[in-house]
Every structure is written in C-alpha cells, then in structure tokens.
Amino acid sequence: MKEYLPSNLRNLALVGHGGSGKTTLAEAILFAAGVTTRMGTVVEGNTVSDYNHDEIERKISISTSLLHAEWRDLKLNILDPPGYPDFMGEVKAALRVSDIALVLVKAVEGIEVGTEIDWSFLKEYKTASCIVINKIDSENSSFEKALSQVRDRLSHDAMVVQFPASEGAGADSVVDVLKMKLLKFDRAAKGGYSEQEIPAALKSSAEKYHEEMVEQLSETDENLLNAFLENGSLSDEQIRTGLKQALYERKIFPVFAAAGQQLVGITSILDFVADLAPSPADVPPALAYKAGNSHEEVKVSCDPGADPVLFIFKTISERNIGELSLFKVYSGIVMPGMDLVNQANGKSERLGTLYVLNGKDRKETPKVIAGDIAAVVKLKDTHTNNTLSGKNLPIIMKRIEFPEPLMHVAIVSKNRHDEDKVASGLHALHEEDPTFVVEVDPELNQTVLSGQGEMHLQVVTRRLKERYGVDVEMVEPDIPYRETIRGVVADSEYKHKKQSGGRGQYGHVHLKLEPMQRGAGFEFVDAVVGGVVPGRFIPAVEKGVVEALGQGVISGHKVVDVRVTLFDGTSHPVDSDEISFKIAGSMAFKKGFKEAKPILLEPIYELEVIVPDEHMGDIMGDISGRRGKILGMEAEGADQKIRAQVPLKELYKYANVVRSMTQGRGIFKQKFSHYEEVPREVADKIVAEAQKDKVEQE
Ligand SMILES: Nc1nc2c(ncn2[C@@H]2O[C@H](COP(=O)(O)OP(=O)(O)O)[C@@H](O)[C@H]2O)c(=O)[nH]1
Ligand SMILES: [Mg+2]
C-alpha cells in the first residue's frame, strides 16, 4: 500500500439512527473504490462491515467496524458504528478518532432519536459534519421534508449541496448546486457519474439553492460578506474556500441526497470529502495532559516528524489472535518493533505486527503515519482509552467518556463450577466493550451486570457463552433492604448458661433498644454500673450485637439506625468468658429487636427523566404507579425534565419503559438517595419470602 501523508487522509465516521443505511453506505464506498468486486447487503448478511455472527443474525451493527479505501490519491478510513441506542458507546469511540462525519437521515422518516443523539456527540467533539439524506429511492421519499426537519431539529446552518433530481424508484441523479450540474450515476460503472446540464424543470430549484448557498456562506466570514455585498455574488473559488473553512468551523453543514444501496450520490460525496473535508492535518491539535499531572495540558499536532503518540479507541477480541487494539496515531510514525510507553501504568509495550482493516480482513502494514488509523495485536497491558507514546513524550490523551450504565441485572451461572470462568470472561469482554460494568456485591453475594439496555446485556451474555463456553442467566438483582425498629424496648434480657460437666459458660446481659434517626447507623452505649458485667467482656457483648446486626433478624438484611445500651447483667467468676457474653449480647438483641416493632427499609433512588412534552403525562403516571413521588418538573431545552423519588425495587428494567413510552426519545438517570420504610404489604411479603428461604436452607 502507498504511504499517505496526513493531508492525504480522511477519517470519516458514518453516523445516524439505526437503519439509516450506514453499513450499506460503507459497503457502497468499498465497492465504488474497487476494494470489493461485489456489493454485499445487510439483508443477505454479507457486508464487509457487519461481519460478526450476532450482527448478521440481528441484521444490525453492534460493534464499530474500521474499513478503508483509496479514493483518488487519498486514503479514506471509514468508521461504521451501530445506530441502536444500546451501543452509543461505540459511536463515541468512533467519533473520538474521526475528523469528519456523515450524518445519515432517512428520506422517509426524517430525523429520529439516534440522529439527535449522534448530533449531540458531534457537537461535543466539534466534528465537521455533512448531512446525507439517504434512501431517496424509497417510495414516499421526501428530500424537502427531511431537509426542513434537519433545519428545525439539527441546525439552521444546513446548506444544500446536492438535491435529488427525482425521488422514488429509479432515482439515479442529483443536482450539484456547487458545480451547477446534474450528476447522473451509473451503477454499472461502480456508481461513477457523468456531469450534464441541469434540465429546465430543475433550473429554478438549483438557482434557489445556489443563492441560499452564497448567502449562507457570506454570513460565515467577513471577507466573503464584503465580497458578496460588493458584487452581489461569490466566485467559484470564494465559494470553495469559504465552504471548506465553514465546514471545519461547523458554521455550515453541507447536505447531500443519496441512495447508498443504489450507488446514487455516493461517489460525488466522496469527491466532495476529498476536495473540501478536513484531513487530520487540518483539524486543531488534539488535547492531552502531562502524564502524572492532569492539569498541565499538552497540544498534540498531527506531525509525522514529531515523537510518536497513539491512542487506543477500541479493542476487539479475536478468537485466533487475541486482542486487536484499534488506534489512531496522533503524531510521529509508528512501526512494528517500536518500544512505546503506556503512560497510564508506566509499562513499556513493544509493538507487534501492524494491520490495516476492512472489517474482519487484516492486511499487514509496515508503518502508520500521524493521522492514520490502524490496528495492532497482542499489547500486554494496554487497553481502550490508553495512550502509548515515546519515552521523551510522557503524555496522556483525553479519554473517551463512555455513557453511564442504565440497566442492571444479576447473573447466575447455570453451572456452579463456572464462576471463575464467568468472571474472567466478563473481564476480557469488558476490555472490548467498556460500556458494560460487572460488580460483585459482597453484601448480597451476587454479580451485577450493568449496561446500556436489554439488548446490550443480551449481547454480552451471548458472547460470554460463545467465546468462553459459560452459560449465565440474567435475573432481577436482589434489593439491599435494611431492618430497623420503630419502638423502644427498655429491657431485653438474656442469660447464656451451660454448667453441666467440665468448664461452664456464663454470660448474662440486659439491653435497651431504641430507634435512631434515619441514616444514623448504629450506636452501642456502655451504661454498666459497678462492674456487674466486667469491663473486659463488654466488647464481646458489642461484638455479639454487631454480628446480629449484620445478619438481620426478620428478613436476613442488615439492621441499621438503632442504639443499643448495655445497662445491666451478671457474671460468674469461673465460667464467664468472651464467647458467653457474645452469645448473650446477640441473643438479647435479637429477642429485643423482634419486640421493638421491627420494620423494613428500602433504598429510594432519585430519578431524572427528560422527555418531550407530549410524553410527560405518561411518564408521570407511570412513576406514580411505581410508588414514586414527583419532586418537580422544569423545562430542559425543548423537553421537560421530571425529578422524582422511586424505590429501587420498582426501577428494574426502567430503561425499557422510558424507551417504549417515548419511542426512544426519553433519557433518564438514577442515583441512590436514601432509605425509607417499606409499606406494610410489601414488607410482609419480603419477610415471608426470607423465612421460606431460611427454612429451605436448613
Ligand atoms: N431503499 C433503500 N434501502 C436502503 C438503502 N440503504 C440501506 N437500505 C436498507 O436499509 C436497511 C438498513 O440498512 P443498514 O445499512 O443496515 O443501516 P444502518 O443501521 O444505518 O447501518 C437495510 O435493510 C438496507 O437494505 C438505500 O439507499 N435505499
Ligand atoms: Mg449498521
């Protein structure tokens, strides 16, 4: 393969709602550029990009694929991430290393939730973006309608560069407003196009869009504005340079019409990208920090002559070769055998074979130059979000911030002996997909798997089965209830006495139990007078009580918010020992607890749901149905933000609820707030359940 300088690279991300045609577009680009000799389809499951078994089966992308093609004298790196909301982390990772994005919008459905979410990421990353109104060959396609949605919901600065000459079946041409030509695409010529005069019927639309273009561009730059005011128009050269600049600066979002599957509008977009889209050398230097000092910023320029710096944005684990780390070189030139330092842990890494990728196909490459994206195998201690750099340049590049998990399930191994394999398998899968989290809850003795949604968790457990041969079941996580008391028991007495044969046991205590404020925890008071319980046994009494607290009395959950006062007792000069007093303390506590009007507490979470106006009523009604309390509502942009407190027990799979009630447009966050008493009927059930379990275990 040729060597490409940074100015000859284009790092292109394809984003948009699921089903907008990203994977098909990637396939079309590879075909148009001569990488493949036949165009695969998502339906047949033979695209280069969606090569994973679960992607083929579900007919959706789950993981970002890296592809590349030569276009004219350029190398295009294409990142094809999934569109489904469960896999948003993949989009964030792909955009982290892209310099330009094509945002696909369906010509029939227009803007969808996924489009808006991706758009917000592009804003965050300040990525130059083009909008592609795709599938103009569909029945009911409406470029105009989609365009007005783009302007209303994404940006007023959308600017038409190519609009369809016709829509629906047979659509094969677009009008290029920059060149003022009709472009007719030829499938037989791999989607190449011929330039023709604009037919009379489309002249006035073409002129209208051209004028809009000139006016919009004039507003992006003072010199252009002056030129426009002076001459009433802009020269082709002024338009091109103005457009290039405005695209970098996100002052303008060029709009194209296409039908990826038909190879219509594709090669002209590639030509536009080649001519006007930013190369990695054009974008501002990347942000990094001095290793060991996150306050000291370092700017990394895309300079092949500088010290090498690369950033791992994704890890794929492959059965035959182990971990494949996908990286972008931010400066310098990277070669196999090079020793670099992982600045996160200070460990040295020797680079192995380097590859360029087309989906699952890998080709060795002798070097990777600044700005380019490639893969390396078998790094020892380096994972997604790590920076590798030369010894003389100890820096850490800004991390990808992955979304917080939204759904939590407990997992149970179907085979008890698999537990270690489950743990190590999940650990390995987490390297590949940092958006799911595994935590072992020592209190409830369960492994909790958290992810972005139901499909995400299914994908994770399925991979666990396929790659590591272990089968797990997903169940509702246990709730960390608490026990406490409402009443005071002034005197709970217990005498532990065993005095038949050998050395006896003797411990005797009187305890007072009283409730404390919510959140106060536990307090032990020593109010013994006159040494009736000898001082050396008092810690043993406390220990007995603390042990009982940990085990719970009525339901097997921890006891909280009680004060226990040891105020009386007796001892025996020979038989008393620590064990005896510990048992006495524990038993007196348990007995008193049962008499002190015990109750159960449950964790209450604070919930924040952001939804479009029209769904607010449904969401609030549903929250009330979940024993929730609405705390308030306020406008959040065009949406409404609802704040509420809801018991954790009622929030299982809440992500599904919000998604289905709002057609995916709602988002939510939850965090622990406090403990509150469980209503009687619910508590009775939990206690009965716990007692049943206890009997079964005995
Ligand atoms: N009519 C039409 N259908 C398309 C076009 N591009 C993709 N599709 C179909 O739309 C569906 C989703 O495409 P896919 O590429 O998987 O979308 P992605 O989820 O954005 O990657 C598939 O059934 C494709 O066959 C197009 O240009 N025209
Ligand atoms: Mg896809």
Image (tube, rainbow, N blue to C red):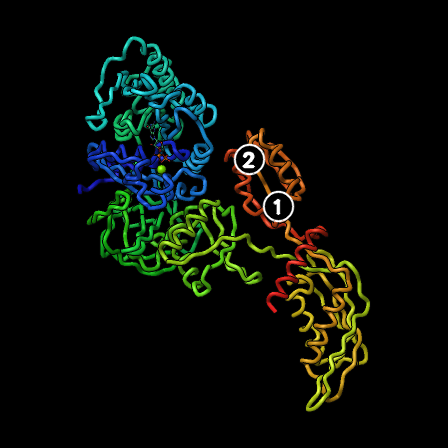
Measuring from the top left, give residue 433's x and y in whole percent: 40, 50
In this rendered view, identify the residue nearer to me: 672 or 286: 672
Whether residue 198 sits left or right of residue 440 in the image: it is left
Type of residue at label 1? Glu
Label 1 residue SS: strand
Outermost left residue:
2
For the point 69% across and 62% down, the residue is 554
Question: Mark 1, residues whose alpha carbon is within 10 Å: few (<14), some, or many (≥20)?
Answer: many
Type of residue at label 2? Met
Give residue 606's mark.
1
Q: Quadrant of residue 146?
A: top left
Measuring from the top left, give residue 117's x and y in whole percent: 46, 35
Give residue 55's mark.
none
In this rendered view, identify the residue nearer to me: 447 or 46: 46
Query: With respect to residue 305, does 521 lie above or below?
Result: below
The residue to which callout 2 is attached is 661
The count of marks equals 2
Query: With respect to residue 182, does 481 lie above or below?
Result: below
Query: With respect to residue 492, does 82 lie above or below?
Result: above
The mark closer to the camera, 1 or 2, is 2
> Quarter holding the C terminus?
bottom right
In this rendered view, identify the residue nearer to me: 82 or 349: 82
- Using the rendered image of the protein, determine whether residue 70 is visible from the camera's viewpoint: yes
Separation (CA) of disc 1 from disc 2: 20 Å
Specify whether tag 2 is near ligand 1 (CB below 8 Å): no
Label 1 or label 2, whichever comes before in sequence order: 1
Measuring from the top left, give residue 402's x and y in whole percent: 45, 46
Q: Quadrant of residue 160?
A: top left
Measuring from the top left, give residue 300's x and y in whole percent: 34, 45
Label 2 residue SS: helix
